Amino acid sequence: MKYLFGADIGGTTVKLGLFSEAGDILDKWEIRTDRSNGGENVPADVVKAVNDKITEKNIDRKDVLGLGVGVPGPIKADGTVLKCANLGWGIFNVTDKFTELLGLPVKAGNDANVAALGEMWKGGGMGYQDIVMVTLGTGVGGGVILDGRIRAGEHGGAGEIGHIRVNENETRLCGCGGHGHLEQYASATGVAYLGTEAAKKNPDSLLAKEPAISAKTVFDCAKKGDKVALQVVDDMCEMLVIALSHVAATVDPQCFVIGGGVSKAGDILVDTLKKHYGKNMLNALQTTEIKLATLGNDAGIYGCARMVLDGAK
């Protein structure tokens, strides 16, 4: 049997997985992300975790195809990370550093991109080769997969759909310093803001009676039929569809895969997106599938492993 390792590096923990060549997950575990001294210990810590697992499982190193690494920041196709603020990393070549330490083939990619690759391989995007994954969490991110491979772009910024402008009249600032970006409406924080503002204007609504308003609160109230919450969901989805329509007109994916914490809302989210999708679109682009991600927090390690497999072919 041949083996693949995946390491999805986050600001708090590193998620690791051991896979068969067929994509079956054989083991998964986590280690703490040591961000001290500008994150200089992270590569050695990850490599140690992989080597320890090889020893624990009594795996012959010649049967290990390599390690895939996902990092929380823009990364170029050659493995050069431009900056990872969450880790304290500056500019350096992740692939070269990990290869030097591990002595096995290493592939590296942006965390959102590798999550998209994982969903294409074994998740909500199975059966497709051209997908765009949209992650609706604290912010809004994404990953572009065309012909079964990550498309990172020249500067590693492909898929940053959260910063597509969807409302030119917005006066609030986005976290990036811009105005009217998708992230301000479709992220968990964005939905909570829209819900809070709607509740203030509609004190008799079910939503207004909630002690605290989060994205989950908004969707829970919408599922109960609260008209104010339903309108918030409708508004949020309309903003998201504006961004998706721009993406569709550019890369024409077979499928959009919606992940992140907000996607746990389930069918109400997908159904509302489908209601708006296709407006003012070319006929040929109106039938793009919209599906929910299925791998959850494991999407990254699956995608990391798939990067190694693609590199070994």
Image (tube, rainbow, N blue to C red):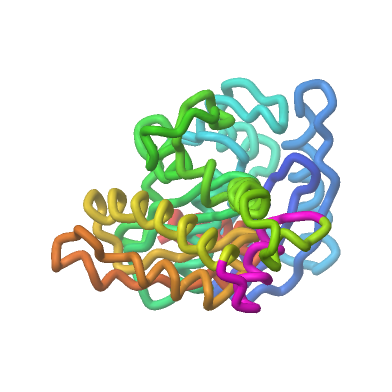
**Residue 4 in the image: x percent, y percent?**
61, 63
Q: Does the magenta stretch include residue 224?
A: yes
At 36% from the left and 33% from the top, the residue drawn is 168
Is residue 54 found left or right of 138 in the rendered image? right
Relative to 147, 262 lies left or right: right
Q: In which quarter of the image is residue 52?
A: bottom right
User: Residue 128, image x and y in percent?
Assistant: 35, 72
Residue drawn at x 59%, y 64% as measured from the top left: 229
The prevailing secondary structure element of the residues shown in magenta is helix
Residue 221 in the image: above or below residue 166: below
**Height in image: 50 above or below 36?**
below
Could you say where residue 44 lies in the image, as x and y percent from the top left?
A: 77, 37
- Comparing 312 with 174, the one in front is 174
Q: Is residue 298 visible to the viewer in this orientation of the structure?
A: no
Which quadrant of the rendered structure holds the N terminus?
A: bottom right
Question: Looking at this view, is 170 or 186 the one in front?
Answer: 170
Residue drawn where x is 74% and y is 45% of the image? 47
The C terminus is located in which quarter?
bottom left
Relative to 79, does residue 305 appear above or below in the rendering? below
Residue 159's x, y, as percent? 42, 45
Name of the residue lying farthest toward the left: 283
Which region of the structure is painted magenta? 212-227
Residue situated furthest front in the rendering: 204
Among the 4 quarters of the image, the one containing residue 136: bottom right
Give the answer, above or below, for where 125 lies relative to 135: below
Residue at image coords 76%, 23% = 38
Observer-nearest residue: 229 or 243?
Answer: 229
